[in-house]
Image (cartoon, rainbow, N blue to C red):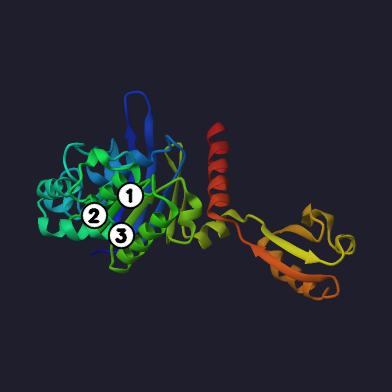
Amino acid sequence: MGEFSCIVDNVVKEYPRHRALAGVTLAVPAGACVALLGHNGAGKTTLLKLLLGLTRPSSGSVRVLERDPASADSSLRQQIGFLPESVSFYDEMSGEDTLCYLARLKRVDRRQCALLLEQVGLSAAANRRVKTYSKGMRQRLGLAQALLGKPRLLLLDEPTTGLDPILRQEFYRMILALRGEGVTILLSSHLLTELEARTDLAIILRQGRLAALGSLEQLREQAKLPVLLRVTTSDVQELSTRLSGSLIVQREEQALQLAVAVEDKMPLLRYLLSLADWVSDVEIQLPTLDDLYRHFGHLQEEEGSQ
């Protein structure tokens, strides 16, 4: 596999009434787990369709596993797994029959169906009709079909919808195991807290444009958002007097919430350590993925309104 599983180069996608993507350029590293983020209408679904070869760009180019997905033969599709946001199946078919049917369509070995059903926790319901499945069971069946053929690239759109917390943890355990095997995963979700510790990179789209691309550390460096400190103290008033008022964002009965620029974090921590008579604990909270998403989305919105 090449250095990148997906390369999107200056892609514009126009529909009769709107422009879904406007000059998007990005690359997804091979073997990475990447979060695809954006508001409804940001262009996420259009980007996934381009990567799947379901539509062609109006201009620019798309390469998936070093090939053009819109003109490639079935051998490329066998290497791609896709779970749509709203997955649907034939209600009268059983879970096992559904998976075997989809395996035939994808031209992959049907013998893996039973193993996949076990992997997603549906072995006991394999012979039940899909119409009896709960939403979470349908979602797990959808994940099983996405894994048919041991794909090299997985495109997952809101994959944990309908899953309870335990099943969500199991889903991410499977995803991390696949990444460990070299599978590239592009995961679109609004549940940013779930993604934060489980993805290598984040792609943020806003109004059809690329707002940001990078690791959490890189996005924090670009955004330059303040670091939050929660300082537990025996004397809130004394500590407030010793600190700059501009740093204090919230007062509690026995603690102060402070906001400090990244470059000032270490000097402030050293100063707080010198106040051991008043300071008993310091908790550090770096900007979260949710903070970064709001930041870059807001910047893009401002630029678009100028």
Q: Which mark is residue 156?
A: 1
Foreground residue among 82 and 172: 172
Q: Quadrant of the N terminus?
A: bottom left
Q: Which mark is residue 124?
A: 2
Relative side of 151 to 105, left or right:
right
Q: CA distance from mark 3 to mark 1?
A: 11 Å
Q: Amino acid at mark 2?
A: Ala
**Could you tell me which residue is drawn at 82 percent across and 75 percent down?**
276
Q: Label 3 belongs to which residue?
A: 184
Foreground residue among 107 and 122: 122
Q: On screen, 255 above or below 206?
A: below
**Could you tell me which residue is drawn at 86 percent across and 74 percent down?**
277
**Could you tell me which residue is drawn at 38 percent across and 31 percent down?**
19
Q: Amino acid at mark 3?
A: Thr
Point out the tag, 2 or 3, that comes first from the N-terminus. Answer: 2
Q: Amino acid at mark 1?
A: Leu
Q: Position of residue 148 (x, y in %)?
A: 19, 55
* Helix, strand or loop under label 2: helix
* Helix, strand or loop under label 3: strand
Q: CA distance from mark 1 to mark 2?
A: 25 Å
Asked if the residue under mark 2 is in contact with the one under mark 1, i.e. CB atoms within 8 Å, the reply is: no
Q: Quadrant of the C terminus?
A: top right
Foreground residue among 86 and 180: 86
Relative side of 104 to 202, left or right:
left
* Helix, strand or loop under label 1: strand
Could you tell me if residue 56 is visible in this image? no
Closer to us: mark 3 or mark 1? 1
**Could you tell me which residue is drawn at 55 percent across and 51 percent down?**
292
Point out the tag, 3 or 1, that comes first from the N-terminus. Answer: 1
Q: Position of residue 198 (x, y in %)?
A: 43, 61
In which quadrant of the rendered view does residue 154 lie?
bottom left
